[in-house]
Amino acid sequence: MTEVESSPATIEINDAIFCQHYKEVCAVCGYDGREENDAFFGFDPIDREGIEASAATLNKDGNYQCKKHALTGCNQCYGWKKQITRLRTQAKKAGKK
């Protein structure tokens, strides 16, 4: 029998992909979604810190919404492009490519 390597379970919150622990980079499940998220938001991938989604709940329609505002697609909590842009700037200043 051949071993099948399983990939970590992912979730989508406001167009960004995270592991089941709400992390873009997770040591627990070995997940790294930075390249996929960067590409989705129109960026070339670089070595930057990962983003982490704030607490979320699954609504009756199967969409994630922030716990703080109870909104699906809450740009205040889930404004990924702005967060990724900030992290990319920090990475460039730190000399990462």
Image (cartoon, helix red, strand yellow):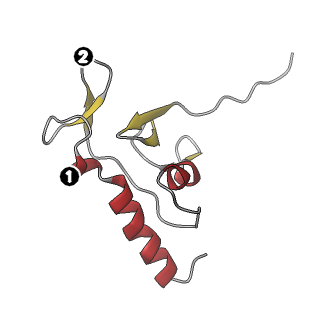
User: Going by the image, does 92 lie left or right of 80?
Assistant: right
What residue type is disc 2 on?
Lys
Label drawn at residue 25: none
The correct choice, above or below, for 72 with respect to 84 in the image is above
Could you say which is closer to the camera, residue 64 or residue 73? 73
Could you say which is closer to the camera, residue 81 or residue 53? 81
For label 1, the SS is helix
Could you tell me residue 32's position as x and y percent? 56, 49
What residue type is disc 1 on?
Gln
Residue at 33 percent across and 61 percent down: it is 82
Q: Which residue is mark 2?
A: 60
Residue at 22 percent across and 43 percent down: it is 74
Q: Mark 2, residues whose alpha carbon is within 10 Å: few (<14), some, or many (≥20)?
A: few
User: Going by the image, does 40 lie left or right of 12?
Assistant: right
**Residue 64 occupies which quadrant of the picture?**
top left
Q: Earlier in the sequence, mark 1 or mark 2?
A: 2
Could you say which is closer to the camera, residue 18 or residue 76? 76
**Residue 89 occupies which quadrant of the picture?**
bottom left
**Residue 58 occupies which quadrant of the picture?**
top left
Could you tell me residue 96's position as x and y percent? 57, 77
Q: CA distance from mark 1 to mark 2?
A: 22 Å
* Cβ–Cβ under 8 Å for marks 1 and 2: no
Q: Which residue is mark 1?
A: 76
For label 2, the SS is loop
Residue at 51 percent across and 79 percent down: it is 92
Could you tell me residue 76's position as x and y percent? 20, 52
Q: Mark 1, residues whose alpha carbon is within 10 Å: few (<14), some, or many (≥20)?
A: few
Position of the C terminus by quadrant: bottom right
Q: Residue furthest left?
A: 69
Position of the N terminus by quadrant: top right
The correct choice, above or below, for 84 with respect to 27 in the image is below
